[in-house]
Amino acid sequence: MRSDTFYLIVQIGILALRLCLLTRCTARLGSSAPGAMVQARQKQLKSYMINDETVQYYSRRAPVYDALYENPERQSDLIQTAEALKSLVSGRKVLEIACGTGYWTQQMAKTASYVLATDINESMLALAKGKEYPEGKVSFQVADMSKMEVNEDFDVLFGGFIWSHISRKELRTWLGQLHRLVKPGAQMIFTDNIFVPKSNTPISSSDQLGNTFQVRKLPDGSEYQIMKNFLDSAELDGLFESQDIHYEFNIFGHYWMLSYTTPAFSANNLS
Ligand SMILES: C[S@@+](CC[C@H](N)C(=O)[O-])C[C@H]1O[C@@H](n2cnc3c(N)ncnc32)[C@H](O)[C@@H]1O
């Protein structure tokens, strides 16, 4: 073989090798290209988003939801919880997630300077909007807490009875996301159920991650499997350990209330 033919074959070989490497690199880059990153992030969000069955359950439960606030055995606990909440939000600007029919919105509006009450379900918000509030103090917005964006500065974030629907494994990520919605140094407040046998719906099953589930029935006979976790203070220690976060945890009979301040210089160091 002539030396220039040999040289040509070697050059073609090198070119083919380069092309091959380039294709593989491009394929790899493709997986971290912006579109793919967004997809990956959305997948991550989906995993801790409350599932569709739970969202639908609350949408259909809206017309009968407030019956739970009529339960005679819970009245004194409700009053204590409301008093604690009103005192914490006094004079402050509140972002409320998962506001439902506005039971807590109404309480907070008595002392807060302003409340933006949000929920994923229009049927819930319609009932919340129908309640009475002090003039100009409350606004409403349909919003999925996992995807929402805000363009106001909030001093407080409040979530009533939503904590129990978040997978234990995803609590840390969920809180980290919520911190981004408020000012650094804002106050986070949550309230939810203590498990009281014979008062709460029995737990029907649990999973390997320690989440517990209830079968909930609506008046039309439809049934839903709903994740409902009952928090204990040991879990809170685990959640906040190694973070410079001091929390207050109080129990009012059937309910617990948690409050803490987000880290002043990093609104997201729980995630
Ligand atoms: C147990 S109810 C609590 C309602 C209200 N906070 C209360 O304590 O009366 C849970 C609420 O979470 C809402 N919800 C469920 N998933 C949500 C999401 N991803 N974003 C915002 N709200 C959500 C439901 O529509 C429902 O109103």
Image: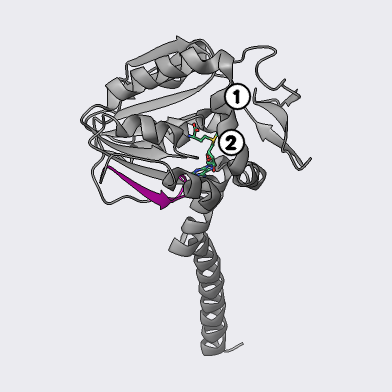
Q: Nearer the viewer, residue 65 or 93?
A: 65
Residue drawn 60% across and 24% down? 229
- Residue 76 in the image: above or below residue 131: above
Label 2 CB less than 8 angstroms from ligand 1: yes
Asked if one can make out residue 269 in the rendered structure from this viewpoint, the answer is no
SS at circle 1: loop
Q: Nearer the viewer, residue 143 or 234?
A: 143
Q: Which label lies toward us, 2 or 1?
A: 2
Question: Which color scheme is applied?
Answer: one colour
Q: Nearer the viewer, residue 232 or 252?
A: 252
* Residue at image mark 2: 65
- Residue 107 in the image: above or below residue 251: below
Name the mark on residue 229.
1
Q: Nearer the viewer, residue 43 or 94?
A: 94
SS at circle 2: helix
Residue drawn 54% across and 26% down? 69
Quadrant where the N terminus sits is bottom right
Extreme-right residue of the structure:
221
40 with respect to 261 (left or right):
right
Q: Which residues are magenta?
A: 137-148
Mark 2 vs mark 1: which is more N-terminal?
A: 2
**Residue 150: where, in percent of width, then height?**
32, 50
Callout 1 amino acid = Asn
104 with respect to 255 (left or right):
left
- Residue 71 in the image: above or below residue 107: above
**Residue 164: where, in percent of width, then height?**
56, 27
